[in-house]
Amino acid sequence: MIGAEPGKPHVSLLEVLCGIVAIAIPLVLALSILRYAVNAPYWDEFDWTPLILHAHAGTVTFDDLWAQHNDHRMFFGNLIAVGLASLGGWNQVRECFASLVVAVIGQIFVLALLRADFAPRTASVLLVLDSLLLFSFSQEGSWIWGFQTSWFLINTCVFGVLWALRTSPLSVFNFALAISFAFVASFSSLFGLNVWPTGLLALSLLHPLRLSMLAWIGFAVIATALYFYRYDFLLQGSSAAATHATPETSLVFFLVYLGSPLGNWAGIDLSATAGALGLVAYIALAVVALIRPRSETMHKRAASWFALGVFAIFCGVLTTVGRSGSGTAFALESRYITPATMLWIGLLSLGVIWFSSVWERRVARIAAFASLTLGAATFVLTALHGLDRMDADYGIHVRAYCVERRAAAAPDDELTAAYPEPSRARSDLAALAAIGVGPEADSSADGGRSAPCR
């Protein structure tokens, strides 16, 4: 059941059911976005106002798209925002659905990777489990905040890189495709640069050819140099907080970050415990599958999933360096759960690969069922917690929408619910209203949502 079965002539009932469930999962999330997303700019989205105004005037330049946002260069995220705004005005709900579409493309890449490494039935079951993680409600803040599209784009590009490099033999076309995905990830956020060591690791395990690895390193150097060309390090406002973090708090922050996809419902302690257990299990399984594999096939099947975990760990290290001084609770932010999820997707496949080699042992079967049971229980609690937080976030966004509708007369302390600089929020909203977009120009009572402004 674990290995590939290319000659299998029919599709089993299990595969059909798993396929239906895998399709249903993002559809359920789509309904949640329809219910909870609010058409109002919120916090960082205000930084897109000049871009939207230039797009409306037809004066968008490369510099507008290339402009640095805090630590990040969000060229492709900016490009998506401009493209979506051209479809009928700036609309945050539309951006949220764009995030979902990007994540669905990532799901397709995951399916392709699974079918390359596992038998169809095993791949189908894993697709359902991976989809539950990919579209988890634990990322609630990102699903109903249009500004987060770049983070989902990076995940999808990482899947795309690993899928392109997984083919054997590695063609020039597939290598070029992997490079393209890596460049898109690199210029979507600072975290996107982690795609280069991730891809290099996959290359070294799947295609240990000096020429391809040297070429990958060369493109990585080019991408990194371009990213930091004329980079203003003074814009890293919150990164300075890392100087106030101790080694102990930084370690806890890192573990909370990794464990948040399963433990955020219970807070810091459980998330840190989940992160520590996940990291230990990941390292142990990587040793078994890569350093002491039972076969060359096992080694090859484990490569992509091991690389996924490396991406999550690198993102965790980068976030810890830049944000740990803000407090350990900051690691539970839903936007960090998106890249941290990659560790658990990789861990699932590594676990199946290892368990399949020792399945005849009773202790292995007991350990597998215990792990799945524990994982399922924590995931259900995480999903319920995420749904509750999504409802709370919806209330915050509705209040922001309502105060933005009367921004000209709203007190500063109320406008800070939408953006920390009230005067800028007021002027941006007025400029948006002048071109017929934004809450002040909205003819409905509440932006199309169910809670009216009173």
Image (cartoon, rainbow, N blue to C red):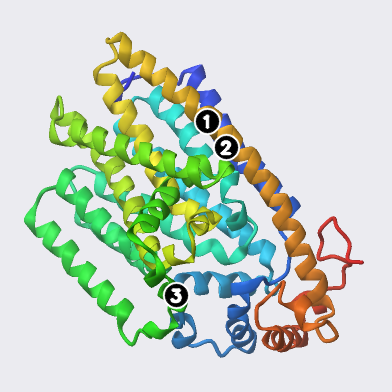
Quarter holding the N terminus is: top left
User: Can you give x and y, in whole percent of width and height, for residue 372 in the image?
Assistant: 45, 24
Q: Quadrant of residue 232?
A: bottom left
User: Can you give x and y, in whole percent of width and height, for residue 164 in the image?
Assistant: 29, 50
Q: Amino acid at mark 3?
A: Phe
Q: Which residue is mark 3?
A: 75
Q: Nearer the viewer, residue 429 or 237?
A: 237
Quarter holding the C terminus is: bottom right
Q: Which residue is mark 2?
A: 23
Q: Which residue is mark 1?
A: 19
96 left or right of 445? left
User: Can you give x and y, in whole percent of width and height, for residue 114 in the image?
Assistant: 36, 35
Q: Quadrant of residue 361?
A: top left
The answer to the question of whether label 1 and label 2 lie on touching residues, with beta carbons closer than 8 A, is: yes
Q: Is residue 449 above or below residue 266?
A: below
Quick one: label 1, few (<14), some, or many (20+) residues within 10 Å? some
The answer to the question of whether label 3 and label 1 lie on touching residues, with beta carbons closer than 8 A, is: no
**Mark 3 or 1, closer to the camera:** 3
Q: Is residue 213 above or below residue 67?
A: above
52 left or right of 263? right
Q: Give the numbered dot on residue 367.
A: none
User: Can you give x and y, in whole percent of width and height, for residue 236 in the image?
Assistant: 43, 78
